[in-house]
């Protein structure tokens, strides 16, 4: 069973869905940029919940059923999506959460681990890279094939056409898949669901206008350095990630004291696909077992 509701967080309402028993340890899933919660697959959430976890996923602002502004006019700064996640944790009164973030969601998770470790029981970072404290210039950039795709992206769809939107999503995700492959029927089905739920699917691209930027509220804080993370951390990285090749995952795990690295063969830059769940789900359940653990 799952339950979906709206939660007021600051100046917006975020759509939140939960799976499992609320008495179980809470696992909060944070999606990547321009992604609603739907990309955390329903069956993946159910498998985590079957492992006695209270699984929580949510739509970022400008995605899904959450408060949505005008496409091209975010009206917020680069750290707002992180503040939304923080505000959601506080609003839901979950206590210490096991935070799982993918791509940009992994960056949000790292920032919260540095700024508010008291709210976190553990950290799982999927398909992401360090937010600071590592020598990023020594790490490889996107693969040649992915860079080539940046130069010829699929044309924007008619945003009112669900089928055209789904085609656009599938075409956009193909370059990010590893040799596990892209399950196109599944991606298309999820995209159709996203389109049906979204106030304005075009507004999700507002994230790309602010992601990675600082804003005034964050400017005077201590620079981000993942070497200061004290929350128990699992890094999950695909062996064939074309955006953040595997050395990014290795560098992140090496920089965070006591972190564990799980390399998923054949996975690209993505939420772990179904063929990887037999590896990833047990690892996440092991990592999120027990109480919060701090490295001093």
Image (cartoon, helix red, strand yellow):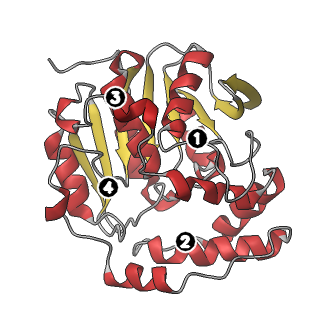
Which percent across, then down, holds residue 207?
A: 57, 53
Counting residues from the start of the chain, the first of labels 1 and 3 encountered is 1
Quick one: SS at disc 2? helix
Disc number lying in front (2 or 1): 2
Q: CA distance from mark 4 to mark 1?
A: 19 Å
Residue under pointer 1: 45
Q: CA distance from mark 1 to mark 3?
A: 23 Å
Counting residues from the start of the chain, the first of labels 4 and 2 encountered is 2
| Residue under the image location 15 percent in, 42 percent down | 255
In which quadrant of the rendered view does residue 13 lie?
Answer: top right
Q: Which mark is residue 113?
A: 3
Which percent across, then down, holds residue 288?
A: 38, 28
The reply, left or right, for residue 238 in relation to residue 164 is left
Q: CA distance from mark 4 to mark 2?
A: 17 Å
Counting residues from the start of the chain, the first of labels 3 and 2 encountered is 3
Residue under pointer 2: 173
Q: Residues within 10 Å of mark 3 (few under 14, many from 20)?
A: many
Q: Tell me if residue 147 can be seen.
A: yes
Q: Which mark is residue 233?
A: none
Which percent across, then down, holds residue 239?
A: 29, 65
Q: Tell me if residue 33 can be seen.
A: no
| Residue under the image location 48 percent in, 55 percent down | 271
Compared to residue 25, the image places residue 103 above or below, namely below
Q: Residues within 10 Å of mark 1 (few under 14, many from 20)?
A: many
């Amino acid at each position: 069973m799952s339950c979906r509701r709206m939660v007021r967080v600051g100046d917006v309402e975020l759509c939140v869905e939960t799976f499992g028993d609320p008495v179980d340890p809470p696992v909060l899933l944070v999606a990547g940029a321009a992604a609603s919660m739907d990309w955390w697959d329903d069956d993946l959430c159910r498998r985590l919940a079957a492992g006695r976890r209270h699984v929580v996923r949510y739509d970022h602002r400008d995605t899904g059923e959450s408060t949505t502004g005008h496409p091209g006019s975010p009206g917020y700064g680069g750290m707002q999506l992180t503040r939304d996640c923080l505000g959601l944790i506080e609003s839901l009164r979950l206590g210490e959460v096991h935070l799982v973030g993918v791509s940009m969601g992994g960056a949000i998770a790292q920032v919260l681990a540095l700024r508010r470790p008291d709210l976190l029981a553990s950290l799982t970072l999927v398909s992401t890279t360090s937010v600071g404290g590592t020598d990023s210039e020594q790490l490889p950039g996107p693969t040649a094939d992915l860079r080539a795709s940046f130069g010829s992206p699929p044309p924007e769809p008619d945003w009112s056409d669900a089928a055209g939107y789904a085609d656009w999503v599938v075409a956009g995700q193909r370059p990010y898949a590893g040799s596990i492959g892209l399950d196109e029927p599944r991606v298309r089905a999820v995209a159709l669901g996203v389109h049906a739920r979204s106030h304005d699917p075009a507004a999700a691209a507002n994230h790309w206008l602010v992601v990675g930027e600082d804003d005034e509220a964050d400017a005077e804080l201590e620079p981000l350095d993942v070497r200061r993370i004290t929350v128990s951390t699992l890094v999950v990285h695909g062996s064939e990630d074309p955006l953040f090749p595997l050395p990014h995952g290795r560098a992140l795990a090496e920089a965070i004291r006591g972190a564990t690295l799980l390399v998923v063969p054949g996975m690209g830059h993505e939420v772990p696909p179904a063929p990887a769940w037999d590896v990833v789900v047990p690892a996440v359940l092991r990592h999120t077992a027990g109480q919060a653990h701090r490295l001093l």
